[in-house]
Image: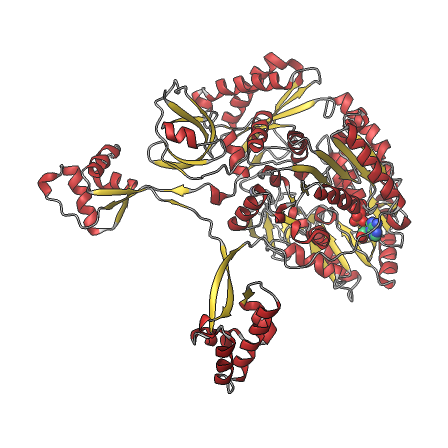
């Protein structure tokens, strides 16, 4: 019987691809192992074994696999099951999930290389013309790629010719696959075996009696070796003996010391677990008990605990309990760059058991983390990471904590798989019969709905740790302040008063403005023209620091204009304001205070963000101006005042979640104030002090906000009452995108009637020279989600078969955020 294997290729193919394998290969291969396979004309891909069976593909002849790359699965059965769910639910290919999940270094690259068999002489009459040409080329260069051969022969089909050359023993193929992963080696030293005995050591010390420093090194090493049996790092010896690496090197050169290397992990933590057990206060303890008893009945629990209520300490207790049962724990965070504080807090408790899976890690570091998790190593008991950590090869997961579960960055936007990490986490936990804890001070409407519905358990924690009061929130009416001339720049007299008071008391201040740059619009005072991005349908933002105009969508920039492009007048005005302008104004208002700014522009470098946070923690900064980066779970002790410069542009954002998000953002940023024992103060400047959301923020009324928003969602058919699938069509030709979107929407309309909205241009309708058009499908609760998706897939496939639309990109976003 013939044997076949279905593999996942790391490219967006709709189906698994089938290859022919031998009986022996079929016996050896298991799902989750990697194989190298030929694909297309001359490409070799790393593919993942998915399924082994006996049915040949019907549409094509199966090729044979090229090489087996693993001797045991690198991807677990549960992972494949989870990936399968992601691919079905979010309507993408398994290959796209594989790409997102596996470190690049695992998805090997190859190029077929042809070289001449060594020491072979061929007479020209033994070869045909084409064959000889290749042979001749190889006399002059050591190797050729397939493309080179194509060029030399000026033919497309060169593989048969190469094959006969191989058969005649003239050339060989090196389809070397390059493992990009190189383990890091650490340098160790020991006494050279020549000097190992006591006696010889004495001789040696005598010999070195005049080289004092070298003698010191040898003595130190001897002592260190006597105390512990551990290998000794060169760096440790240098530290212990106070010698420079030059001195140690001299000793190695003289064969007195011997150097050797051991492969180690780079994903290590050098410190000791040292934090003392914190005991929970009674509120925390009650919450912990409630979570545990809720877990007996429910697999998901939502912990709704106000900012600074000590949720992290509760997580730590839950983690401890899992560790006792030898289970792995996954701790998900919305964005790993923002979590320096948390990572060190957990490492203080759990030391080496913590592995951080970081999007900024190098390929090698990711490979190590992957292997540690797969092997359930000591080091990988607690895994902290952002959403892609969900795709790792867990062995025995007991608990997933989704911290700040309301954060929208849990949803992947681009590229596919466009998954929501919170929702995919719950599915993953279920595959392991594990529990999921969602934690936040401001639950998403979805999660709170599920909790109210009884689908999730709900535990509330309403007291801040240490009984610190919730911050005192004051709304400042901008219209009134402007009318009565109580403004200096963008600062009301109230804000200036409070800032002065906080600074006089030696406290720090956070100022929030959700736009970066100096001002988002530049306008000619004569003709009203304002410069636009040439590639996108947006105004250019003025950045004073570089005296540039920049596009925040595509990165386009130009020098600030000297005069209006339309009428030539030189009086250009700016409208609106961003963080840069606020920073500027603060410096004028408080010239002797230290001001810094935290936004995308100031945190670009690898450690840019961490550096700013540390400086603020160390109180090297008095006033920190920033965008929403400031809101994410940071714990500063000396912040007494938070100022929100303008709440209105948050509230007026054109999105059905704008109000929910404004609430979350303002409560979160307010929560950065007064975290130790003093009550914090928050000032919110707005033109709409009576806006419901602002009232709810200032009275800390989450449930009121929730009820009102849920009513809206009912009335306007939005999540969590309806589900959404958004389809975006993109093309550089305006007419084509219109035609394509009309065709697509009409087809959907026939099935889903009034639950199809659009096609519609989004507020920014052109980005990077591509026109965008959206279609929104609303899915009522009683309508089958899987049937809906099947129907969409069918329409999608007919769409793809229309020649005119082939170049139109279509993005399907399930549970659009
Ligand atoms: P949240 O995550 O709910 O915002 P945190 O866990 O960051 O709150 O706690 C707020 C502050 O209170 C932190 O500085 C934390 O160290 C401190 N804290 C919380 N619980 C305890 C406890 N049981 N004992 C000592 N300090 C605590
Ligand atoms: Zn642009």
* Residue sitting at x 21%, y 49%: 118
* Left/right of residue 292 with respect to residue 607 in the rendered view: right
- Against 35, residue 379 (above or below) is below
Above-or-below relation of 197 to 611: below
Residue 728: percent from the left, percent from the top?
57, 28
Report x, y in % for residue 236: 58, 68
Q: Quadrant of residue 37?
A: top left
Can residue 673 be spotted in the picture? no
- Residue 659: x and y in percent read 77, 34
Colour scheme in use: secondary structure
Identify which residue is drawn at 53% across, 81% down. 215
Q: How many marks?
A: 0
Which image quarter is the C terminus in? top right
Q: Dividing the image into 4 quarters, which one contains the N terminus?
A: top left
Above-or-below relation of 345 to 787:
below
Q: Quadrant of ligand 2?
A: top right
Q: Residue furthest bottom?
A: 210
| Residue at the left extreme of this rendering | 125
Most foreground residue, 59 or 472? 59
Q: Residue at x 19, y 41 (%)?
A: 169
The residue at the far top in this view is 750
Percent of width and height locating residue 64:
35, 29
Residue 125 appears in the picture as rendered? yes
- Which quadrant of the view contains residue 712? top right
**Residue sitting nearer the eye, 431 or 133:** 431
25 vs 380, left or right, is left
């Amino acid at each position: 019987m013939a044997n076949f294997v279905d593999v996942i290729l790391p490219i967006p193919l709709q189906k698994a691809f089938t290859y022919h394998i031998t009986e022996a290969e079929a016996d050896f291969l298991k799902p989750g192992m990697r194989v190298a396979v030929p694909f297309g004309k001359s490409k070799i891909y790393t593919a993942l074994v998915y399924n082994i069976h006996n049915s040949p593909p019907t549409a094509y002849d199966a090729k044979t696999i090229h090489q087996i790359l693993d001797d045991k699965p690198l991807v677990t059965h549960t992972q494949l099951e989870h990936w399968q769910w992601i691919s079905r639910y979010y309507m993408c290919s398994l290959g796209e999930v594989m790409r997102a999940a596996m470190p690049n270094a695992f998805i090997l690259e190859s190029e077929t290389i042809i070289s001449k068999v060594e020491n072979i002489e061929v007479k020209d009459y033994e070869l045909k013309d084409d064959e000889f040409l290749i042979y001749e080329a190889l006399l002059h260069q050591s190797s050729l790629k397939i493309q080179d051969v194509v060029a030399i022969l000026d033919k497309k089909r060169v593989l048969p010719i190469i094959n006969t050359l191989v058969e005649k023993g003239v050339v060989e193929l090196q389809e070397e696959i390059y493992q990009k992963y190189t383990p890091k080696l650490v340098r160790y030293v020991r006494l050279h075996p020549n000097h190992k005995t006591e006696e010889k050591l004495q001789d040696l010390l005598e010999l070195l009696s005049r080289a004092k420093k070298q003698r010191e090194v040898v003595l130190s090493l001897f002592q260190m070796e006597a105390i512990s049996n551990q290998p000794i790092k060169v760096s440790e010896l240098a530290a212990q003996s106070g010698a420079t690496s030059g001195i140690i090197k001299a000793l190695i050169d003289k064969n007195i010391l011997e150097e050797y290397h051991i492969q180690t992990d780079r994903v290590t933590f050098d410190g000791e677990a040292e934090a003392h057990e914190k005991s929970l206060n009674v509120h925390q303890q009650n919450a912990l008990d409630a979570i545990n008893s809720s877990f007996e009945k429910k697999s998901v629990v939502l912990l709704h605990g106000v900012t600074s209520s000590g949720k992290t300490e509760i997580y730590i207790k839950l983690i401890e309990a899992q560790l006792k049962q030898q289970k792995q724990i996954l701790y998900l965070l919305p964005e790993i760059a923002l979590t320096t504080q948390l990572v060190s807090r957990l490492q203080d408790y759990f030391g080496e058991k913590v592995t951080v899976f970081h999007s900024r890690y190098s390929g090698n570091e990711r490979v190590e983390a992957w292997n540690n998790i797969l092997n359930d190593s000591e080091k990988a008991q607690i895994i902290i990471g952002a959403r892609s950590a969900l795709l790792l090869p867990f062995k025995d997961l007991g608990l997933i904590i989704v911290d700040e579960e309301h954060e929208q960055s849990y949803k992947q936007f681009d590229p596919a798989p466009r998954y929501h990490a919170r929702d995919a986490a719950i599915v993953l936990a279920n595959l392991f019969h594990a529990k999921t804890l969602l934690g936040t001070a401001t639950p998403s409407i979805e999660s709170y709905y599920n909790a109210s519905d009884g689908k999730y358990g709900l535990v509330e924690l309403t007291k801040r740790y240490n009984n610190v009061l919730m911050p005192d929130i004051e709304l400042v009416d901008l219209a009134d302040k402007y009318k009565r001339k109580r403004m200096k720049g963008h600062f009301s007299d109230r804000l200036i008063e409070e800032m002065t008071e906080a600074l006089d008391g030696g406290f720090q201040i956070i100022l929030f403005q959700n736009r970066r740059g100096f001002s988002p619009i530049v306008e000619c005072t004569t003709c009203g023209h304002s410069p636009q991005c040439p590639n996108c349908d947006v105004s250019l933002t003025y950045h004073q620091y570089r005296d540039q105009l920049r596009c925040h969508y595509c990165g386009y920039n130009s020098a600030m204009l000297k005069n209006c492009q339309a009428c030539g007048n030189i009086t250009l005005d700016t409208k609106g304001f961003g963080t840069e302008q606020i920073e500027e104004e603060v410096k004028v208002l408080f010239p002797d205070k230290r001001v810094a700014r935290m936004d995308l522009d100031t945190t670009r470098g690898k450690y840019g963000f961490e550096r700013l946070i540390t400086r603020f923690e160390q109180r090297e900064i008095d006033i920190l101006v920033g965008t929403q980066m400031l809101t994410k779970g940071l714990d500063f002790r000396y912040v007494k005042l938070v100022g929100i410069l303008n709440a209105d542009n948050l509230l007026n954002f054109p999105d059905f979640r704008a109000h929910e998000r404004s609430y979350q953002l303002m409560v979160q940023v307010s929560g950065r104030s007064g975290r130790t024992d003093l009550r914090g103060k928050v000032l919110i400047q707005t033109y709409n002090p009576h806006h419901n959301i602002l009232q709810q923020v200032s009275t800390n009324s989450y449930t009121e906000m929730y009820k009102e928003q849920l009513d809206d969602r009912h009335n306007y058919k939005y999540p969590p009452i309806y589900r959404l699938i958004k389809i975006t069509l993109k093309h550089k030709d305006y007419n084509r995108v219109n035609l394509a979107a009309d065709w697509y929407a009409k087809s959907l309309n026939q099935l889903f009637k009034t639950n199809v909205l659009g096609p519609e241009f989004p507020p920014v309708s052109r980005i990077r020279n591509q026109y965008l058009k959206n279609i929104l499908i609303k899915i009522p609760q009683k309508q089958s989600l899987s049937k809906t998706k099947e129907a969409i897939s069918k329409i999608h496939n007919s769409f793809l078969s229309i020649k005119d639309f082939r170049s139109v990109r279509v993005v399907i976003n399930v549970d659009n955020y």
